[in-house]
Amino acid sequence: MRKRQARHQRIASKSRRRRHAARGGRITGNTTVYVAGAGWRDNDTSMQVIGMDKAVVQKQIDALMKEEAKRGYDDESYDSVSDAMDGIAYYGVSTFALKDIVSARELPEAIREINDLGYYYPEMP
C-alpha cells in the first residue's frame, strides 16, 4: 500500500513540474498569478510570495513566516517561536495580474524566477 502511495506522489510531483515547464516563456505582465501575504501584526505587509501554483505559494509563505518568527525569537523580541508566530498575521492567497503586483523594472526578473523556481519574492517598500 505504501509503495502505491509513494508512486502516486512521484507521479503527481512530475505532473506539477511538467505543468510548470509547459508554461515556460509564456508568462507576461497580464498573466494571472497567486499572491500570498503576511506581516507582523503591528506593521504593514512585510512578506509576500508570487507564483503560478497556489500550493507552492502557500508552502513558500509558510516557510517565510517560520523563518521570520525564528528571527524574532533570536532577537529576543519574543519568549518563544510560537509566540513570534502569533505575532505574524497571514493575509491569505489572492489572484492578481502580475503587472499589478510588481513594478515594470522588476517584471523581467519576476518572470524569470517564476519560470525557474515556481515563485518570486517581490521587493517590499
Image (tube, helix red, strand yellow):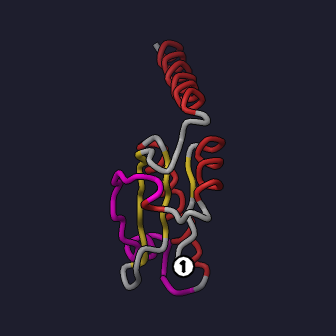
Q: Answer above or below: position of 71 versus 10.
A: below
Where is residue 2? Give x, y as percent: 49, 17
Q: Nearer the viewer, residue 18 or 100?
A: 100
Direction from residue 116 to residue 2 in the image, left or right: left
Residue 106 placed where, x, y %?
Answer: 60, 62
Residue drawn at x 48%, y 82% is: 79
Work out whether 42 lies above or below 3.
below
Residue 91 within the magenta-colored segment of the rendering: yes
Asked if residue 89 lies left or right of residue 125, the reply is left
The segment highlighted magenta reads 76-99
Q: Amino acid at mark 1?
A: Gly
User: Residue at label 1?
Assistant: 72
Identify whether 54 is placed above or below 102.
above
Which secondary structure lies at badge 1?
Answer: helix
Question: In x, y percent, where is residue 73?
Answer: 55, 78
Q: Is residue 77 above or below residue 104?
A: below
Q: Please report the residue visible at 53 percent of the width from the left and 57 percent of the height from the top.
A: 63
Q: Which residue: 45% across, 61% down?
A: 101
